[in-house]
Image: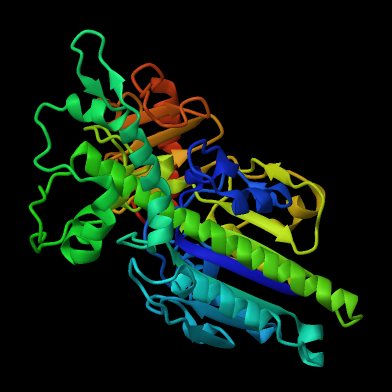
Amino acid sequence: MRVIVVTLDRLPARLLACFGNEWMETPEFDQLAARSTVFEQHFAELPGPTGPSHPWWTGRLEFFSPRNSADSDSAQAEGATISALVQAGVRCRLLTERTEGLPLDAFSSWEAIEAATGLDIDHSETAIAQLVQRALDVAGEPADGADESSGELLWLHSRGVPSPWLPPRFFAELYLNELEEEEAEEEWDENTGKTLIPEFRMEVAELETEPEIEFDSSGILDDLAASPALVESLLSESVTSDEPESDVSAAQTELERLISRYIFAGYVSMIDHWIGRLVKGLEEAAAKVASDGRFSRETVLIVTAASGHADGARHSFIEESDGASELCDEMLQTPLLIHRIGETGFGTRCRTMLGPQDLAPTLCEFFGIAPHAATSGLSLKEPLDTGPVSRRNQLFHLSPSGEVAIRDEDWLLVLTDRSLLDGDSLDDNDELLRDARLYALPDDQWQVNDVSSRRRDVVFQLAGKLQSALRSAGRLAIPASQ
């Protein structure tokens, strides 16, 4: 048995066509989804960087798991699940483009990938490309007798879309070319007789003040290649403290937002391309082994991500507003696909609510190992084998700034101040109600219609569940009366 896991620190599900995106083209993910089990409701607990206590490695939530028992403490040990697999005789190999914050010592072996960056390199030199090419080399190594009987886990860890998100020129130009086409299609305002350019020029015109500088989209890549500070300003999670080398305002104009968005999309397209190369290479290798009459092990591919957009990248995709939450689904929803290499039939879709803690028990079941007793995750092998099931009715989330949220099948409740949950009774707490934002799911998938004032009953019901979860995790004081 061989399981190949591809994890990306950042890849928003909603930028993939197989998750409903109608603008970007992600043909390789589409083809993979058509033959895989696609888990449509997979959400991060904390939208941010991954560390050694990430639920991938432990099967436990980082923030909401109870921490008052020895079992809980041991389950949170770095790479607990990987260590258990190694002890059971599974060869666990890690290929990664970054080493900080990962449980390297838990693996049987690990290898850091060295890659080039920059606009003018070939995309085969990038980190995701080097990771895939090295993985195909490793996967193509002949299995010895021990490997055949004990199984192998090959874990590919990628940053996904990094910051700054600047792919090589070929992919950076993919969507900028669309911007140029929009510029070329002139329209006339019938009242003023002035030339209009669709979408971005009309949006810029609506701003109270004209942007200080506008970029010629045909030359933006050359500008970026000449100015690292400009790259940081336009394509980074945070604005650099250094002044850009060109006269660029710190506040992004609408055109700058579009440029940032289009180049981000180009990076996603590059990831899509190399995921396709990985799947194709694994399928070809499996077919060759079978045709040669050699031992052919069952191979399962799992592709997922830790978070969607980084907080600083939200300006490129999400409308800014005073009520905008860090716990929106663009940040939280991430792809999860499981595919058996060689399967050619139609895939399935599962709407069970899932989180990253479900990966660890799934790996254990694939290799016939019992997960840790304190694991809170659910194995996904059953829905993969027998079809969609529904076993979880709520999920919890925490943002980097401290917002907390709970979701069930019908609602998402977000609270910006979790200290409001400290009280004994939450009923008719007007301060909590003012802080709460409640969204109806799945209809309000973009979380733009806050209905908390109209559904007070739901707010207090979900707040009570969130309070209980936080107390169980030791994040809120338990009143002496209890």
Taking depth in this image into account, of 242 and 454 the one nearest to the observer is 242
Residue 383, percent from left and from top: 74, 50
Residue 106, percent from left and from top: 53, 83
Q: Quadrant of residue 462?
A: top left
> In the rendered view of the protein, which quadrant contains the N terminus?
bottom right
Numbered marks: total: 0
Left or right of 202 in this view: 386: right
The residue shown at (78%, 91%) is: 144
Residue 476, percent from left and from top: 33, 51
Q: Is residue 272 above or below residue 195?
A: below
Q: Is residue 288 above or below residue 216?
A: below
Residue 76, percent from left and from top: 48, 71
Left or right of 434 in this view: 446: right
* Residue 26 visible in this rendered orientation of the protein: yes
Taking depth in this image into account, of 475 and 140 the one nearest to the observer is 140
* Residue 401 visible in this rendered orientation of the protein: no
Q: Quadrant of residue 46?
A: bottom left
The residue shown at (51%, 47%) is: 13
The residue shown at (16%, 42%) is: 214
Q: Look at the image and name its color scheme.
A: rainbow
Residue, far top: 191
